[in-house]
Amino acid sequence: MDFQAVIESLPRYGEPLLVTVGVTVASAALALVLAFGLGLMTGSRHLAVRTPARVFVEFFRGSSVVVQLFWFAFAMPVVLGIQFDYLIVAGIIALGFNYGAYSSEVVRGAIAAVPKGQLEAATALNLTPLQKLRLVVLPQAWPEMIPSLCAFAIMLLKASALVSVIGVLDITWLAGLLGKQPGQDRLLHYAVVLVIYFVLAWLIWTGMRALERRAKRGLGIEAKVQKGRLAPAVAAGGVD
Amino acid sequence: MDKSFGDLKVLDELSFRVDPGERVTLIGPSGSGKTTILRLLMTLETVTPKADPEADGGVVWVEGRPYSHMEKKGRLVPANEKWLRQRRSRVGMVFQQFNLFPNMKVLRNVTEAQVHVAGRSKEEAEAKALSLLDLVGLADKTGEYPSRLSGGQQQRVAIARALAMDPDILLLDEVTSALDPELVADVLAVLRDVAATTSITMLCVTHEMGFARDVSDRVMMFDSGRIVEQGPPEAMFSEPQEARTQDFLRAVLAE
Amino acid sequence: MQTGWSNETLREIFPAIWDGFIVVLQVTLVAGIIAIVVGLLVAIGERNGPAWLRRPLSLVFQFIRNTPLLVQVLIVWTATSLYINPDWSAFAVGSTVLGLHYASYTSESYRAGIDAIPKGQWEAATALNLPSHRVWGAIVLPQMARRSAAAVGNWIIAMFKEVPTLFIIGVMEMIAEARAFQGQHYTGAVEGYTLAGLLFLAASYPVAVAMRRLENRLAKSNF
């Protein structure tokens, strides 16, 4: 195996790495916004609010993210008669919608898990519904969401590799390109990319754990320091 | 001073009034509906709707005005959230399980509603909170999270939190039931203090008969959602008339 | 350039997409068996395997779990077709990689199921001096199976929806079929991908609902 050629081409991963990180961050931001919006809506008492959100969530969870990616990249432009200047936008929308739908269940579950007594105390103090949400419910639900949202963020990072197949120039795409060039070892390039993804996943996980510790401290709880293990914290119901 | 306040009526079969400044204790076996009455008054539950509330009853009145209902085109209809928000500002509640907000330190638990509901300035709210926390003996715990306090301390914070909103009516729902026995005395002492120094109307569900005897003007014995017997505490505890009350008191005092 | 939806194209592309759907089901069957069996072996190995095996096993599957399936498929396919045996089919290689990828998830669900077994059960087994295979076969696995069933089932549904990733090495599932159709007819993106998405929805939604019921029933059963 020719390590030299691979090492020499490492700097070329710089820009595609920014693309991978950018796609992940942008679609995670979109997913987070959707997760909160849909999570609040699916938890609503009102059928008229709940139903459209429920349909959206089941639609995107029920289908394949790979197919959704192709649909947003190649079918939606035809249907709407528009042309994406950047396919990366299609990728971000597909990933953001799909993981937003999944994560909304985390948000809904965490909100539903806030003890009823908390809401009653808030009513007794005459807080408005919006104040209850902002001052009492969300601050308590947030720390509970973090581990599951972290698991989805890592899954989203992994799924971001799929944008390479619709023509976005990320690190997976570059590994395929370089691997085909003479004097290069394709296996080594894919291995390099795998390691990069693993390191990024570890960074997300470490960051989320710090965030969780901080959030728990905001509840006066010293979070248990668990032994490091990159495991899916997704509850069974969250991934179907 | 306007004293027209304090005219309470609950459910159709059940009907009673409480005068302003009166201290009423509700006793009776669990499941007899005592807590439900407090929850109705706090608008955590709604009254079973009647076709014609004016004739059939089923309306809670406070200060001679409808509370669980509102007037609309000359008729009483179940109150909407806006009406309830306006009316329930007169009522405060302390819960069996304290229900302090775990995401806020002690001081903020007491200031939060003052600022966001009563519209007081932060300084004003904090000054009031500090004096109330001093009253309940927790002036040194203002910077702690509730999770770091004992049950008795949490409950005293909850009392301060309710009092901070200057309620005319204070509802106390088995406030010592969830506490370890050695912590009960501190909480009751605070409540005795409140009863002695203010003129707040108090409705109190409790199993602490000594407290009921000392503090209340009237004791009501409940069973199966009805008032079995009521009267001043001395009469109720020394010479209960109904067999149901006698049995209950014997069982409770034997504990 | 195609514009909008065409029922005629839909009729033409349907058989191809349907063939792709059958392939998806076949991959799911093979990869599902691998995920269910290997995941269990990994969970047991990580807990009761020889000491020299536990740490590496855990690390390898942690790595698999935290890196993209797409790249794993590409690297294994490159390795087999260039270095090991070019005759191995994309179907076999793809299904195996997919199965192992999801074994990294199912093993975590099994592990949670084992961890949830009360300590008293292990102690009782020790007190009865049961041999290790009886402890696992008669006590641990049956209890774990109930606790893990719904979670593992949900991972299999998730896996089913990731089968299209294998188009990248030429497994003729729905994406590959749609692309092939487009290559021949210069149309069919809208109809092909929409149809593929709806077929996934139609197949996975009822199973997901059934899985939620199972979950609720198992959660309620006192065992």
Image (tube, coloured by chain):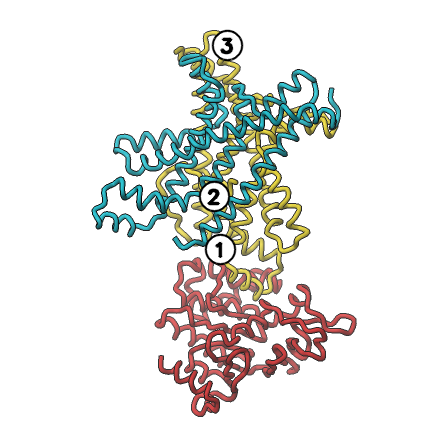
Chain colours: A yellow, B red, C cyan
Label 2: chain letter:
A
Percent from the top left, x then y, of residue C95?
A: 47, 25
Tag 3 or tag 2, which sits nearer the N-term? Answer: 3
Q: Name which residue type carries label 3.
A: Gln
Q: Amino acid at mark 1?
A: Asn
Residue A93 visible within the image: no
Q: Secondary structure at mark 1?
A: loop
The answer to whether mark 2 and mark 3 are in CB contact below 8 A is no
Side of A67 where C139 appears, left or right: left
- Circle 1/circle 3 CB separation < 8 Å: no
Cα separation between marks 2 and 3: 43 Å
Instruction: Identify the residue shown where x is 38% and y is 82%.
Output: B253
Q: Residue at x 48, y 42 (%)?
A: A148
- Chain for mark 1? B
Between residue B164 and residue B42, name the one nearer to us.
B42
Q: Quadrant location of the N terminus of chain A?
A: top left
Residue A166 x %, y %: 60, 23
Lateral position of residue A36 relative to residue B195, left or right: right
- Name the residue beneath numbered marker 3: A181
Secondary structure category for the residue under label 3: loop
Query: Which label sits on residue A236?
Result: 2
Report the side of A226 relative to C7 (left or right).
left
Instruction: Report the mark closest to the observer, 1 or 3.
Output: 3
Mark pair 1, 2: CA separation: 28 Å
* Residue type for callout 2: Ala
- Between C98 and B8, the one lying in front of the other is C98
Q: Are marks 1 and 2 in contact (CB under 8 Å)?
A: no
Q: Nearer the viewer, residue A140 or A75?
A: A75
Residue occupying image coordinates x 58% and y 57%: A132
Label 3: how many residues lie within 10 Å, few (<14), some (14-19) or many (20+)?
few
Tag 1 residue: B103
Identity of the residue furthest to the right in this view? B73
